[in-house]
Image (tube, rainbow, N blue to C red):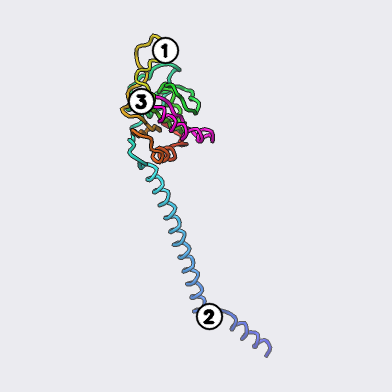
Amino acid sequence: MAQRSRSKTSAASRPSRQELQEIAAKRQRNSNLMLIGGGIVLAVIVGLILYANFKSNQPVGEEESLPTLGNTHIPQNSISPIQYNSVPPSSGPHYPGLAPWAVYREPVRYEQLLHNLEDGGVVIYYQCEDNCPELVDQLEAFARPLIAAGRHLVVVRNDPSWTGDVGAITPLHQDMGARIALVAWQRLDKLEEFDEARIRAFFERYEGLDHHAG
């Protein structure tokens, strides 16, 4: 009698076929929901990455996007063997060493500053016949706190008449056709008046992007 009672209890405790099917269906639904959820999360991540890449390639102002001329190193103090595709240049042959991140009141060779661009720097050139002291003061006020904080920024004079060495006749700079030129690797924006918001947007977009791959 006791054995028969235990058998009935054991049979009653086992799930029925219908219950087993319901459990299996529930597990399948949970598994499907997890897969769908994971797929949605993955799609969102991929979408954000694609959007970030797309946004990084969009101009922040009116700058040009220029084809690369490569990043070949040439001997110090030599002249670029090719003609750059912009003034000031944004890529191409350059010297192996960096110019210190600083504000310069005198010109610096394009071939030198291109290495700064390759290293993720931004160079702000200014050009004016009267030396534009007010503009230089504005650019210095913008640049010095960033340079002091270790950011990669150079402010420098562009002078189409500068020949460098005494007795040289070939100018080492060219007329850039504007009072201000913002330059990053393969990027160039020119403006006539100091515009801090536009300058800062350009700097924040392109500073820190390494370009040693070419």
From what the image shows, is residue 166 above or below residue 194? above
Mark 1 nearby-residue class (10 Å; few <14, some 14–19, many ≥20): few
- In percent of width and height, residue 181 lies at 37, 31
Q: Left or right: 68 with respect to 154?
A: left
Magenta span of residues: 132-157
Residue 32 in percent (x, y) is at: 45, 65
**Magenta segment main secondary structure:** helix
Q: Callout 3 environment at 10 Å: few (<14), some (14 to 19), or many (20+)?
A: some
Q: Which numbered dot is residue 16?
A: 2
Up-down relation of residue 79 to residue 4 (above or below) = above
How many angstroms separate mark 2 from mark 3 (CA)? 91 Å
- Which tag is nearer the camera, tag 1 or tag 2? 1
Q: Is residue 54 magenta?
A: no
Q: Is residue 58 above or below residue 88?
A: below
Mark positioned earlier in the residue sequence (2 or 3): 2
Cα–Cα gap, marks 1 and 3: 21 Å
Magenta stretch holds residue 146: yes
Foreground mark, 2 or 3?
3
Question: Disc 3 marks which amino acid?
Answer: Cys
Residue type marked 2 = Ser
Q: Going 40% across and 45% down the picture, which residue do you hit?
A: 53
Q: Nearer the viewer, residue 151 or 214?
A: 151
Relative image position of residue 211 (x, y in whole percent): 44, 33
Quadrant for the N terminus in the image: bottom right
Q: Secondary structure at mark 2?
A: loop
Neighbour tally class for label 2: few under 14, some 14-19, many 20 plus, Cα within 10 Å:
few
Disc 1 target residue: 165
Question: Of the numbered discs in the image, which one, if any, rests on residue 128?
Answer: 3
Q: Nearer the viewer, residue 11 or 154?
A: 154
N-term mark: 1 or 3: 3
